[in-house]
Amino acid sequence: MQTLAKPVSVPVPSTEKKQERLLSIDVLRGFDMLLIAGGGTFLVLLENKTGWPWVDWIAQQLQHPAWNGFTFYDFIFPLFLFIAGVSLPFSLHKGLASGLSKTDLYRKVFVRMLILIALGIVDKNTPILFFEPSQIRVASVLGRIGIACFVATLLYLNFSWQKRILWVASLLLAYYAALFLIPVPGYGAGDLSMEGNLVGWIDRNFLPGRLLQTTYDELGLLTQIPALCLTVLGTLAGDVLRSGLRDNKKLIYLLLPAFTCMGLGLVWSLHFPINKHLWTSSFILLTAGMSFLFLALFYWIIDVLKYQKWAFFFKVIGMNSLTVYLAYRFIDFYHTSYLLFGGLYAPTPEPWHKVFEALGALLLVWLLLYGLYRQKLFLKI
């Protein structure tokens, strides 16, 4: 790990063995993006229909809690931010090896950030109310990804992995201190309620446009600080995967931070509750640890043990993640599913119709992505 202790400053030598693309990263990204985009809707719709408690439990895990608390669905977006960080060392070293300077990379990632912010605004505001700017939501999933990747790139190219850990620790502690020490007018300091928290006050006073939750926006201004820590931590995992360490060493270096982060997050939650709406520091550490764990599991099964046939379904999605995200938004797959398959499930009980419609929509999305995969067409920014 000594080679990771210095900031990136020179291109990778041309004599270095070409880095193979890791299937596990694409598969994990595909698994995650499928749930982000809405591919798990049919599982949610199964609740209270089968009579099987375990199915109802899965359906409940794919819904966000009202405020404090944690479900598996809360983990999905943080995992994507983490995966974005995992991919950064591969893409940045590839850019350096091709002759790009650090300035070139800054410019490239900055432009990508602006494009993602713009796409995010379009995604969250269709149809866009151009003449009512107060009703346009500025915060978005894509915008958050763009900002996190830009900041993570700056840190990766200029700081060693130890100093990046210090950056993450400092940001999470500063965010913790801000929410507990800065008084909110009318509520005071340390109020973590839905109405009185600092995050909401900053969004209401400084974030233009419409706020998703009216009193705050969970993708707003202040929560960007802890959220980007997930991407920075992802770069540490990316360094491990692209290193020359043996597979068992790589797994150790992924599992150690996994259990450390989860443990710290759970302990911290005793005072700073796990809350996705506020992106609390305990929530960040818990989901970061889970991300390390999932990455280690996928890497071990897919790239070490070579059990790969089952992964093709998710690989197709993972290699076109932006496409599936935007496709679910702008193409009515559910209506098409009804038109194509409605006659097949018409004889079933009516409460099941929406389940089969959602399953048909998922099939149509995958077939679209498979066609693009066969033609080697991938939407990238």
Image: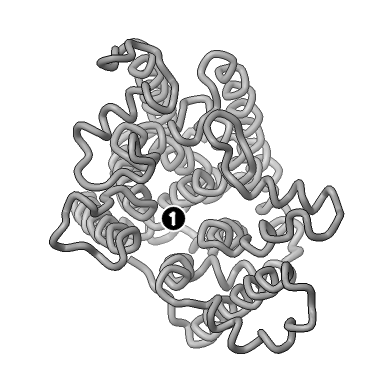
Q: Give the residue at x 66% y 29%.
A: 259
Q: Give the residue at x 73% y 50%.
A: 58
In the figure, residue 363 lies in which quadrant? Answer: bottom right
Q: Amino acid at mark 1?
A: Phe
Relative side of 253 to 112, left or right: right
Quadrant containing the C terminus is bottom left
Q: Give the residue at x 61% y 73%.
A: 362
| Number of marks | 1
Up-down: is 19 above or below 66? below
Secondary structure of the residue carrying tag 1 is helix
> Mark 1 packing: few (<14 Cα in 10 Å), some, or many (20+)?
some
Q: Give the residue at x 38% y 59%.
A: 94
- The reply to whether residue 101 is visible in this rendering is no
In the figure, residue 69 lies in which quadrant? Answer: top right
Residue that numbered label 1 is attached to:
90
User: Seen from this angle, which residue lies furthest left?
Assistant: 131
Rendered location of residue 208, percent (x, y): 19, 43
Rendered location of residue 71, percent (x, y): 63, 40
In the figure, residue 302 lies in which quadrant? Answer: bottom right
